[in-house]
Image: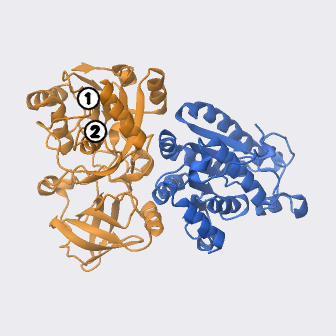
């Protein structure tokens, strides 16, 4: 255990209870960076991933976090995930829907995309976040009623706005997620639950390497940087971020 | 007794009312497996929390059934093998130990092996919601979580909460009706064993958020109505105010039965299912109505074909003048295909 971690834990003792954050796709790329970032800020974290071995490795490396095996694209996995999130954290203040599917790999023209590949992208990037948000909405709205605030952050991409060739399945699913976020944010405003959709930018992650193997990593944003910006955005959307030991900071780049 | 349409439920409420619901999510509390020493098949139904700590899934009170499943009425299920403290139970990926028997050969405290995270994962993969013989298809978790379900601490669904949806919450707000929640670990409602049912309801831990306590106490001071969504909310609020009529925020445990003769200090009206006589939920309605009107209600429900089982029809009962409104509850059409408004009534 590193020293900064134990310092953070001590600071937390005065927070009752600390911010409770659930992150999907939490064992790689941006998701893993978000787990680390929120942990360093003193949050209680549950993270979801498909691969059990990878999940256990991260949970061992980051003691105190709760690893949950599940696939957001599978309907049958959603309530078991929600049960474990709420059970292990004792409630939820923040849900980050980060797990994403590129659709066809390597990327393909829409006319070369199998319908099943589009379905999988929609299941992972749109329906899964909708299902999990809905299953956890009772817990999130309870946090809002208690004055803690509640935020759902849906990770999108500039492919949700720009019609990049070969990004059809991914781009269409993220565009739908962006619009769903906007409508839900308007509908849930009176409940005190915020729904954000933010683009972290092009990052040096496994997902990016699969999509664009020839990209120069040096030209890409580090996932830690994006995670810090996103955590700041979440803190800013909570009523009193400092109450939870989450320090508000600068606004990140947003598509909205 | 008035009959209304479910869609008009919110019109029974008035500006200034405070509506309180139980936001407990329902555990997958039914676990099939075997009694290791005898090899006998068993079903364990988690039934209660041994302490007021609601976030430790290592220890539970449980009722143990013998071979068979929910397709048999619980009354007709054979008993489990004879249980002794120290016995091991193998429940799918879960392994448990009987810690103590609780005054009945089928009622025990058990402890699961493993860390809380591992136990949650195994409960999620192996556990099923407690099932009902009258419901045709097996219930999944999504069938038994109300729209506002949050902390997974209830053993059976706080089902009056199904009357609420996000539209009705928005409608209430626009009509000046306030809404708050508490978390009450609703225990098992019936075991099919008269001796065991006499022990019900078990002691039930609850948690009342500071904002909810403040809202109720302000209501008492200003004379507004407090409307409980379900019997579990009545139990929690009346327990939390038992000392001096003022709601204390935080954790507590509701003990004992509420019934005819119990003086209600907090709750003015209840939205509830139409429970069967003999159950503790039914007895609780006596505190709102008194003995004779409660019996009259039972007769009226029977005459008018209200459905009095779990996932049946709904009532709003007011304490002051004993007025009752009833509606065909269609919030359960996903589990009981016939349960559409107007079909049963």
Q: Is residue A55 visible?
A: no
**Which chain does the numbered disc 2 sit on?**
B
Q: Is residue A32 visible?
A: yes
**Is A246 on the left-hand or right-hand side of B66?**
right
Q: From what the image shows, is residue B152 above or below residue A143? A: below
Chain seen in blue? A
Q: Quadrant of residue A195?
A: top right
In the image, which disc is placed on residue B246? Answer: 2
Residue A17 place in picture, x, y as percent: 49, 54
Q: Nearer the viewer, residue A52 or B291?
A: B291
Residue A41 place in picture, x, y as percent: 63, 59
Q: From what the image shows, is residue A33 above or below residue B36? A: above
Q: Nearer the viewer, residue A221 or A157?
A: A221
Residue at the image position 31 percent from the left and 20 percent from the top: B4
Residue B218 place in picture, x, y as percent: 35, 31
- Mark 1 vs mark 2, foreground winner is 2
Secondary structure of the residue carrying numbered label 2: loop
Residue at the image position 82 percent from the left and 48 percent from the top: A167
Are marks 1 and 2 in one subunit? yes
**Is B16 on the left-hand or right-hand side of A209?**
left
Q: Quadrant of residue B306?
A: top left
Chain seen in orange? B
Q: Residue furthest left?
A: B292
Residue B286 place in picture, x, y as percent: 15, 34
In the image, which disc is placed on residue B341? Answer: none
């Amino acid at each position: 255990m590193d020293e900064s971690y134990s310092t953070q834990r001590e600071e937390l003792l005065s927070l009752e209870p600390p911010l409770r954050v659930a992150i999907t796709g939490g064992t790689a790329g941006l998701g893993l960076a978000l787990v680390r970032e929120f942990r360093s800020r003193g949050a209680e974290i549950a993270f979801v991933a498909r691969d059990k071995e990878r999940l256990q490795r991260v949970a061992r490396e980051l003691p105190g976090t709760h690893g949950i095996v599940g696939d957001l694209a599978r309907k049958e996995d959603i309530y078991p995930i929600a049960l474990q999130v709420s059970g292990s954290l004792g409630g939820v203040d923040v849900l980050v829907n980060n797990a994403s599917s590129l659709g066809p790999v390597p990327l393909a023209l829409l006319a070369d995309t199998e319908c099943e590949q589009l379905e999988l992208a929609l299941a992972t990037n749109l329906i899964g976040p909708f299902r999990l948000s809905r299953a956890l909405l009772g817990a999130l709205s309870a946090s809002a009623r208690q004055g803690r605030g509640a935020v759902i952050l849906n990770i999108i991409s500039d492919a949700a706005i720009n019609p990049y060739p070969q990004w059809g399945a991914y781009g269409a699913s993220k565009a739908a997620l962006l619009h769903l976020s906007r409508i839900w944010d308007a509908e849930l405003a009176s409940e005190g639950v915020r729904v954000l959709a933010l683009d972290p930018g092009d990052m040096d992650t496994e997902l990016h390497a699969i999509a664009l193997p020839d990209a120069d990593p040096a030209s890409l944003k580090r996932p830690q940087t994006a995670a810090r910006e996103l955590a700041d955005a979440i803190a800013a959307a909570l009523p009193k971020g400092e109450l939870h030991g989450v320090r508000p900071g600068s606004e990140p780049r947003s598509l909205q | 007794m008035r009959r209304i349409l479910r869609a008009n439920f919110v019109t029974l409420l008035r500006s200034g009312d405070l509506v309180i619901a139980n936001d407990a999510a329902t555990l997958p509390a039914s676990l099939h497996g075997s009694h290791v020493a005898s090899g006998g098949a068993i079903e364990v139904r988690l039934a209660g929390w041994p302490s007021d700590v609601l976030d430790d899934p290592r220890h539970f009170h449980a009722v143990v059934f013998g071979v068979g499943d929910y397709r048999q009425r619980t009354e007709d299920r054979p008993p489990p093998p004879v249980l002794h403290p120290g016995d091991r139970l193998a429940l799918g990926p879960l392994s448990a130990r009987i810690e103590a028997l609780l005054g009945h050969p089928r009622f025990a405290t058990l402890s699961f092996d493993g860390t809380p995270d591992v136990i949650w994962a195994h409960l999620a993969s192996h556990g099923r919601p407690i099932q009902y013989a009258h419901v045709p298809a097996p219930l999944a978790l999504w069938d038994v979580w109300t729209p506002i379900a949050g902390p997974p601490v209830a053993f059976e669904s706080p089902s009056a909460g199904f009357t609420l949806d996000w539209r009705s919450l928005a409608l209430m707000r626009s009509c000046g009706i306030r809404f708050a929640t508490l978390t009450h670990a609703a225990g098992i409602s019936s075991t099919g064993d008269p001796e065991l049912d006499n022990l019900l309801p078990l002691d039930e831990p609850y948690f009342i958020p500071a904002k909810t306590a403040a809202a109720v106490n302000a209501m008492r001071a200003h004379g507004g109505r407090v409307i409980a969504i379900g019997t579990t909310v009545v139990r929690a609020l009346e327990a939390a105010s038992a000392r001096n009529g003022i709601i204390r925020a935080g954790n507590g445990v509701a003990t004992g039965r509420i019934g005819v003769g119990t003086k209600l200090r907090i709750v003015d009206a209840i939205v509830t299912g139409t429970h069967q006589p003999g159950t503790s939920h039914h007895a609780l309605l006596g505190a709102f109505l008194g003995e004779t009107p409660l019996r009259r209600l039972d007769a009226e429900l029977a005459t008018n074909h209200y459905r009095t089982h779990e996932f049946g029809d709904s009532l709003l009962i007011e304490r002051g003048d004993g007025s009752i409104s009833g509606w065909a509850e269609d919030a359960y059409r996903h589990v009981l295909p016939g349960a559409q408004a107007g079909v049963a009534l």
